[in-house]
Image (cartoon, rainbow, N blue to C red):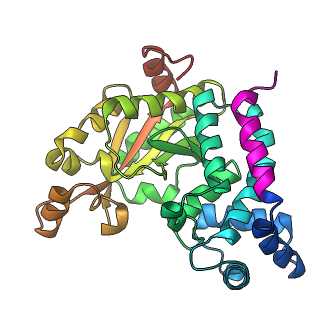
Amino acid sequence: MVRFAEFLNPVRERLQTVFAGQNISAPLRFFDSQGFSQEARRTFLWCLWRHGRAPQQSALLAEARRLCDSENTRFTEQALLIEASLVSIERLPGMPIPESVARFTAADYDFFAAPPPHWLFQLNFEEYSFHAYAGVAILKRFPAGIFSWEVSGFPRSWFFRVSLRDALALAARFAGLGGFSPFLFPHMTVDRRSVRFMTLPEVRRAFLRIAWTLAHSPKLKGILANSWLYSTETARVSPHLAFLRALVLDNGGCLCDLGAAPASAGFLAGDARRAELYEQGEYHPRNTMVLWPREAVLSWAASQPRFDNP
């Protein structure tokens, strides 16, 4: 039996049914008539995922929406995501991911096929949510619960944002790891829950899923991240999030200050008290780098229940 067939087959059928319909085929025919091929459309999704923009195609997308969409539809964006997902769903069983991550990915593909009206705003190619979904559609981003991961490397420019002491310590760490890439880089997942609480069990499960991929991908060097969530300031004003720092530091990882976090980083959402303190100048969140080496992650994961099937 093909891996994950039980839940992938129904999703594939739904994608194929919607893909064959007039609403989805119309924008694709328009793109073909403009010389915007299927390969170019997948590259467009890659650009949105990687860079958050693809200015050369923006006018073409806007024209397709004018011709094929109403105010309350996103058929153009759906068409791009469904087309890419139908290719990717065939590759999903061969990816080094646990079943739970494959199920999360399939759930996103299901969403592309039939998005509820109140979540249509996420399918706007100008928005971050669509850029994240583009990564899922082309298998560059993998939802693992509260976090989604991508493969990335350490930006050398970060050396100039940390203290001299941290820079020397990082250089030694990377030398021991054998290089600056590849790492698994977690981001907050874009999903369809109206209310989300970050708890230790949920974070632990997400990191276990990431660790599972580490264990099955020998070339990956560990987990690398950059977020205000790991800032000492965040732990001070939101003590319920202090476990994030402890989880890394108590299990062989290190944290380095990368400078002040911009207001657009996300810390103003989800906690009115934190936003109030920031506006009053009493909360100064910092971008904080996480470096959690492979062997340390796997040692932690091996001590956790259900690591074999997170």
Q: Residue at x 73, y 64 (%)?
A: 80
Magenta: main secondary structure: helix
User: Can you see residue 131?
Assistant: yes
Q: Residue at x 48, y 49 (%)?
A: 189
Q: Residue at x 11, y 61 (%)?
A: 282
| Residue 221, x across and y down, in percent | 57, 34
| Residue 47, x across and y down, in percent | 67, 66
Quarter of the figure with residue 113? bottom right
User: Can you see residue 220?
Assistant: no
Q: Residue at x 63, y 79 (%)?
A: 70
| Residue 177, x across and y down, in percent | 55, 33
Quarter of the figure with residue 72? bottom right
Describe residue 151's horizontal placement relative to residue 7 as left or right. Answer: left
| Residue 13 among those drawn in magenta | yes
User: What is the quadrant of the N terminus in the image?
Assistant: top right
Q: Does residue 203 lie above or below 138 as drawn? A: above
Q: Does residue 231 lie above or below 259 as drawn? A: above
Quarter of the figure with residue 77? bottom right
Q: Nearer the viewer, residue 209 or 27?
A: 27
Describe residue 60's horizontal placement relative to residue 208 as left or right. Answer: right
| Residue 52, x across and y down, in percent | 57, 68
Q: Nearer the viewer, residue 215 or 52?
A: 52
Q: Nearer the viewer, residue 112 or 127?
A: 112
Q: Does residue 310 lie above or below 90 as drawn? A: above
Q: Which residues are magenta?
A: 1-18
| Residue 20 among those drawn in magenta | no
